[in-house]
Structure formats: C-alpha cells, structure tokens
C-alpha cells in the first residue's frame, strides 16, 4: 500500500471532484446537503418538538451532531460501494484492494474539512469563540477516521458478498442516528429505560464521538470512561475490519 501512496492520494481527490459533476451547483452540494439537513432538523426537533430545551447554543450543538454523524455515515456507504463500483479498475490495474475503501474514507474526510470551517464559523457567530480545546481537534478527527476505516472495510466486503447490504445501510444509519444524540439528548430520553438500553447507548461510538466534538467546540462534559470506550471500539473496529477485508482480497473484482 505504501508503494501505491501516490495512487491513494490521487483517487480521493478525483472522487471528490467528480461526485457532484452532473449537478448545476457542483461541489457546493458538499456543504449544501448537510446545511439543509440542519435546517430541517432545527425546525422539526428544535422548534416543533422543543428538543432544544435545556441545551445551550442548540444550533451549534445540532450542527456538530449532523456534520460528525454524516462523516461516519458517508464512510460506511462509500465503503460499501468501494469494491462493487470499481470492478473495471480492479481488472485493469494491480493494486492492494484495501486502497479502495481507504480512498473513499479519505475523500469524505476532505469534505469534512470544509464542514469543520462551517462549525468553527457557527461557533464564532454564536459567541462560543476559540478555545484551547480546539488544539485537540486533530486527535478527535484521527479517532473518528480510525473508526470510519474499520467500518468501511467491513461494509466493503459485506457488500461484495451480498449486494443488498448497500440498500440496507441507509436504513441502519437512519436508525442509529436516533441512538447517537444527533438532534436531541438521547441520554435524558432513555433515562427511564431498561438497563440494556443504557448499555447500548454508552457503548455507541458515534454518540461518544459527537460528545467529544461538542466538548471541543462547546465545552459540554465528556467522561474519561466514555473516551476510553471510544478508543477501544475504534481500534478494535479497524483491526478486525481490516483483517476481515483482506481475508477475501483475492476474490475482489472477479464477480
């Protein structure tokens, strides 16, 4: 993979450039889509359902949740199509197949760089201002990228085995969104729920990731135990996901 580093660097840039080529506004949609989602969720959850009650600076709180969740959701969806949509490339060029989900994750990470500028701008406009916690942002991004890579490796192989996986992922991610505290405080809503619900919530890496980003930009509390569980899950997902993907590398592109 290191010998193909130029290819790995060029592929996500090309994917980013061509992703909205057929639309009128082009790559503006990289920011337009999440901003429209924020607007819809703000009206429904912030105003109509009053989910903003008890949450300081709900607009920034919501923007962080939507953007961070979208990055992981896109990584999983992109990973699912990374192998199945590049059959021709795999048959014509020899390279490690792990490059495909890797480049897909990095492509979405490039987009997230622009989204981070929106988060920072909203933080400044809503009076949060800059803080020393921002210096830890690269570590948080690295942690999310670790998780995203592992998930992308999983979905890439699963979708190569069963092409229905790509159709199931959007519904799975939509369900997971409500368990990750993107639009409302999921812990307070599940306070009276059974113990197994609390266990699922506490071990949900996406919830921990969103909490960590909110701590960086908003200063909301995040516990050491939550961070430790996030690190464990992210590393385990990457290691197991990579081994799961590579185990079937010889079969990719032959279907």
Image (tube, rainbow, N blue to C red):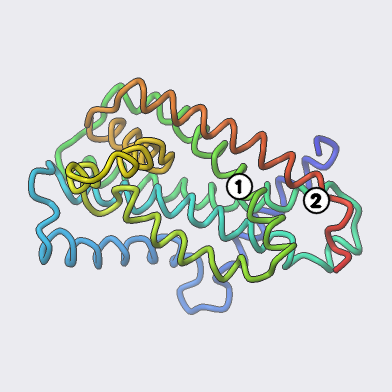
Lateral position of residue 160 relative to residue 92, left or right = left
| Looking at the image, residue 182 lies above or below residue 36 | above
Identify the residue at horizontal 54%, vertical 39% (top origin): 147
Q: Earlier in the sequence, mark 1 or mark 2?
A: 2
Secondary element under disc 2, as helix, strand or loop, is: loop
Q: Tell whether label 2 touches label 1 (CB within 8 Å).
A: no
Helix or strand or loop: what does disc 1 sit on? helix
The one nearer the camera, 129 or 161, is 161
Give how far across and how far down residue 124 sits, in percent.
22, 40
Residue 244: x percent and y percent? 73, 44
Write the residue at 91% across / 53% down.
94
**Circle 2: is it few (<14), some (14-19), or many (20+) Cα within 10 Å?**
many
Q: Which residue is mark 1?
A: 106
- Compared across the picture, whether 114 is left or right of 16 comes to left
Image quarter where the C terminus lies is bottom right
- Cα–Cα span, label 1 and label 2: 15 Å
Residue beneath the point at 37% across and 61% down: 34
User: To which residue does mark 2 refer?
Assistant: 97
Give above or below for 225 relative to 27: above
Work out whether residue 91 or residue 175 is closer to the camera in this orientation and state it.
175
Q: Residue at x 84, y 50 (%)?
A: 249
**Image quadrant where one finds the N terminus:** top right
x, y percent for residue 62: 25, 51
Foreground pick, 74 / 161: 161
Question: Which quarter of the figure has residue 236?
Answer: top right
Asked if residue 35 lies left or right of residue 45, the reply is right
Residue nearest the observer in this picture, 138 or 22: 138
Mark 1 crowdedness (10 Å alpha carbons): few <14, some 14-19, many ≥20: many
């Amino acid at each position: 993979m290191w010998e193909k580093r130029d290819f790995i660097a060029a592929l996500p840039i090309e994917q980013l450039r061509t992703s909205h080529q057929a639309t009128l506004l082009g790559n503006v949609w990289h920011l337009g889509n999440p901003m429209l989602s924020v607007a819809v969720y703000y009206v429904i959850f912030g105003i109509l359902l009053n989910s903003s009650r008890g949450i300081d600076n709900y607009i920034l709180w919501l923007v962080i949740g939507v953007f961070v969740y979208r990055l992981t959701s896109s990584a999983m969806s992109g990973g699912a199509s990374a192998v199945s949509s590049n059959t021709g490339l795999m048959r014509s060029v020899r390279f490690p197949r792990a490059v495909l989900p890797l480049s897909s994750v990095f492509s979405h990470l490039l987009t997230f760089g622009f989204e981070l500028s929106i988060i920072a701008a909203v933080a400044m406009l809503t009076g949060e201002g800059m803080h020393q916690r921002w210096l830890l942002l690269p570590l948080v991004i690295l942690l999310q990228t670790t998780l995203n890579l592992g998930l992308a490796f999983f979905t890439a192989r699963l979708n190569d085995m069963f092409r229905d996986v790509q159709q199931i992922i959007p519904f799975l991610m939509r369900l997971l969104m409500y368990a990750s505290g993107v639009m409302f405080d999921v812990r307070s809503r599940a306070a009276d729920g059974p113990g197994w619900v609390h266990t699922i919530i506490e071990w949900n890496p996406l919830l921990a990731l969103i909490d960590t980003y909110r701590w960086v930009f908003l200063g909301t509390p995040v516990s050491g135990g939550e961070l430790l569980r996030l690190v464990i899950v992210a590393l385990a997902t990457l290691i197991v996901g990579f081994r799961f993907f590579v185990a079937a590398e010889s079969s990719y592109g032959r279907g």
